[in-house]
């Protein structure tokens, strides 16, 4: 897959203080999560890609175009949902989204049509003529998403899209993001400090810490490789023999207390064979779990300082 | 696609020309302004003086009407010359100041208050286009109030007086056009700059008057205390009036300027100083706008 964003020694400074420190990465996923604690530089990175901040040194490319030389073209491909409230309170929802679509270059008739569509799509069809200032927090978040997608961007920047949402509203927002992702005709960058949001929506993650890249990993790849790690809970007298038999099949094993076994399956060996082996050895497999190296583990590892503290 | 289908689809249709996007801002601003009944009444009332001036010009050239009213000597009471047109421009410019104070503060401050700039500027739309869009709202309305009626009156006078009068007094037309443009440009930039820095609209409107009246009072105080005329540099209407006299009458000034823009006796400044002061004011306004019109504010 072509890279969505290439960071080429990107450095951003505010008042001489480095905020992003010579970032180098190539992000290729369909949906990419930007993770990091507050102040890590996530929003600054998005704002720099949008051309709000000038790089001090280095550059970045969005869908192959340099942000220094093709800023306008880059912005024409992007739909941006900012973190904070951003709207004009006295405007009706549909008029506001239409204005934003027209500024993105849509003729006024098409902008109006797509503003209505976007509002229905995000579930605000019934309130689209109400002033934005009267919307609840969840509705405002959805309206921000509507203005971000109304002009049909190629790339969507979502900055903390579930901020302040209650659980049902959050679930609806995540579902919308997943739907947009699964359609496959636009790619998205989701910036969040909520691991669950990123885990549910993204297939690649870039973790920032103090303006540096702390980790960059492919979540899909991680999920696939984690499928080889298993935890078994067994019952039966011949547990030792079972372990030996597993090792003969090429598994790496480690025995825990009360019949617990951790093992790594070799390539080509199917889980079904474990059950067959257990039956031969008269061992009951009471539980079998894929040990998952969750995003939380990845994040915590990335956040660990040299002295081991977070 | 019907809206009830509730799905996302990419856009592959035609796009508008990128140079024309600032007009979108202008169109939406006009739609908002049209809703204000007070503004509509004020705007219509502002054309009263040009109508009276047109009537004066017509009566001046209509001997039978004067005879009918038994006012045979009235044609000598009002002279249609540079001073007449400067007075028209002065009145209209004063009205323009009120209009700018009324609509100017509402141009940028709502976008800043609601953080909407990040959305405007995340599109293929630049900061200068945004300012141009907002500026064009004020420039259009103020133009219709100042130089447009001024030139229409000039055309009426030329039509009634004859082609030779028009060619002989072409300087008046140029003075009306350029004089009004300098004024409305200064007003519009000042109104936008204050709108960008003062988020509370009534305060921004009051501050616009403050810049004119308080600063001129301060300048007059400096003149009196220091026994100098340089305090008048703070008086924008004096600066404007001096430039107008130069534009209308050239090197041979016969009047003392337009109403509200008259230069007090003994406080004449060199014309180049007035130009420099107005240019400096415009530069300050642009710098204020440049600092505030940003997609993301940096807290250092």
Image (cartoon, rainbow, N blue to C red):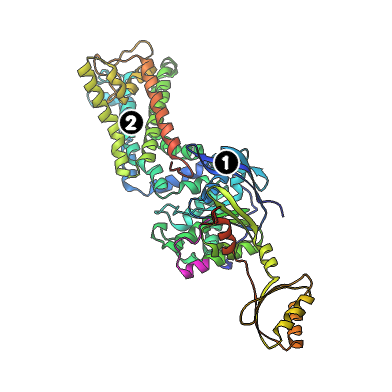
The numbered mark at residue A11 is 1
Q: Of tags 1 and 2, which is closer to the observer? A: 1
In what element is the residue under mark 1?
Answer: strand
Q: Is residue B196 visible?
A: yes
Compared across the picture, whether B40 is left or right of A31 comes to: left
Query: Residue lying farthest front?
Result: A240
The residue identified by callout 2 is B92
Q: Are marks 1 and 2 in contact (CB under 8 Å)?
A: no
* Mark 1 belongs to chain: A
Q: CA distance from mark 1 to mark 2?
A: 53 Å
In-front residue for pair B265/A148:
A148
- Packing grade of label 2 (10 A; few <14, some 14-19, many >=20) is many
Query: Is residue B235 shown left or right of residue A227?
Result: left
Query: The N terminus of chain A lies in which quarter of the figure?
Result: bottom right
| Percent coordinates x, y for residue A65 in the rendering | 66, 43
For residue A171: magenta? yes
Q: Residue furthest top?
A: B252
Q: Is residue B168 above or below residue A37?
A: above
For the record, the magenta segment spans A159-172
Within the image, what quadrant is residue B183 found in?
Answer: top left
């Amino acid at each position: 897959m072509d890279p969505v964003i290439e960071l080429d020694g990107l450095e951003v400074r505010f008042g001489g203080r480095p905020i992003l420190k010579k970032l180098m990465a190539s992000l290729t996923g369909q949906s990419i999560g930007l993770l990091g604690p507050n102040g890590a530089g996530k929003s600054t990175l998005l704002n720099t890609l949008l051309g709000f901040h000038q790089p001090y040194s280095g550059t970045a490319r969005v869908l192959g175009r340099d942000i220094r030389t093709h800023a306008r073209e880059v912005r024409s491909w992007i739909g941006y949902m900012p973190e904070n409230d951003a709207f004009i309170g006295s405007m009706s929802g549909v008029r506001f989204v239409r204005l934003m679509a027209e500024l993105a270059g849509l003729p006024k008739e098409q902008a109006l049509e797509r503003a209505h569509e976007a509002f229905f799509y995000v579930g605000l069809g019934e309130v689209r003529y109400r002033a934005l200032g009267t919307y609840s927090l969840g509705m405002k978040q959805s309206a921000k998403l509507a203005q971000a997608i109304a002009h049909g961007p190629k790339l969507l920047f979502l900055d903390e899209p579930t901020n302040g949402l209650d659980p049902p509203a959050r679930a609806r927002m995540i579902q919308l993001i997943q739907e947009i992702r699964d359609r496959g005709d636009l790619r998205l960058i989701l910036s969040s400090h909520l691991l669950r949001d990123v885990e549910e929506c993204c297939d690649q993650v870039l973790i920032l810490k103090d303006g540096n890249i702390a980790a960059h990993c492919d979540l899909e790849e991680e999920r696939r490789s984690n499928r080889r790690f298993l935890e078994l809970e067994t019952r039966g007298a011949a547990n030792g023999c079972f372990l030996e038999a597993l090792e003969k099949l090429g598994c790496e094993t480690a025995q825990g207390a009360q019949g617990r076994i951790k093992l790594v399956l070799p390539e080509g060996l199917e889980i079904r064979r474990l059950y067959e082996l257990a039956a031969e050895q008269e061992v009951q497999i009471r539980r079998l779990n894929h040990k998952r190296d969750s995003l939380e583990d990845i994040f915590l590892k990335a956040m660990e300082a040299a002295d081991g503290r977070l | 696609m019907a809206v009830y289908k509730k799905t996302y689809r990419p856009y592959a249709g035609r796009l508008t020309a990128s140079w024309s996007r600032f007009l979108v801002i202008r169109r939406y601003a006009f739609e908002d302004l049209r809703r204000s009944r007070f503004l509509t009444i004020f705007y219509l009332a502002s054309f009263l003086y040009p109508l009276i001036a047109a009537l004066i010009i017509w009566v001046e050239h209509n001997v039978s009407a004067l005879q009918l009213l038994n006012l045979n000597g009235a044609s000598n009471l009002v002279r249609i010359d540079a001073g007449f047109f400067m007075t028209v421009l002065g009145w209209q410019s004063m009205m323009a100041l009120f209009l700018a104070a009324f609509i100017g503060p509402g141009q940028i401050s709502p976008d800043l208050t609601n953080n909407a700039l990040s959305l405007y500027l995340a599109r293929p739309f630049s900061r200068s286009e945004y300012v141009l869009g907002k500026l064009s709202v004020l420039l259009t309305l103020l133009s219709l109030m100042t130089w447009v009626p001024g030139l229409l009156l000039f055309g009426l006078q030329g039509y009634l007086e004859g082609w030779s009068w028009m060619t002989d007094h072409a300087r008046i037309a140029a003075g009306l056009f350029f004089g009004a443009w300098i004024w409305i440009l200064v007003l519009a930039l000042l109104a936008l700059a204050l709108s960008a820095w003062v988020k509370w609209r009534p305060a921004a409107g009051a501050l616009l008057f403050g810049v004119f009246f308080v600063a001129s009072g301060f300048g007059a105080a400096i003149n009196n205390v220091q026994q100098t005329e340089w305090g008048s540099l703070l008086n924008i209407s004096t600066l404007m009036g001096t430039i107008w006299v130069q534009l209308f009458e050239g090197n041979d000034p016969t009047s003392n300027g337009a109403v509200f823009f008259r230069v007090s006796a003994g406080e004449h400044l060199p014309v180049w100083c007035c130009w420099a002061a107005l240019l400096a004011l415009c530069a300050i306004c642009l710098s204020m706008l440049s600092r505030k019109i940003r997609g993301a504010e940096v807290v250092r």
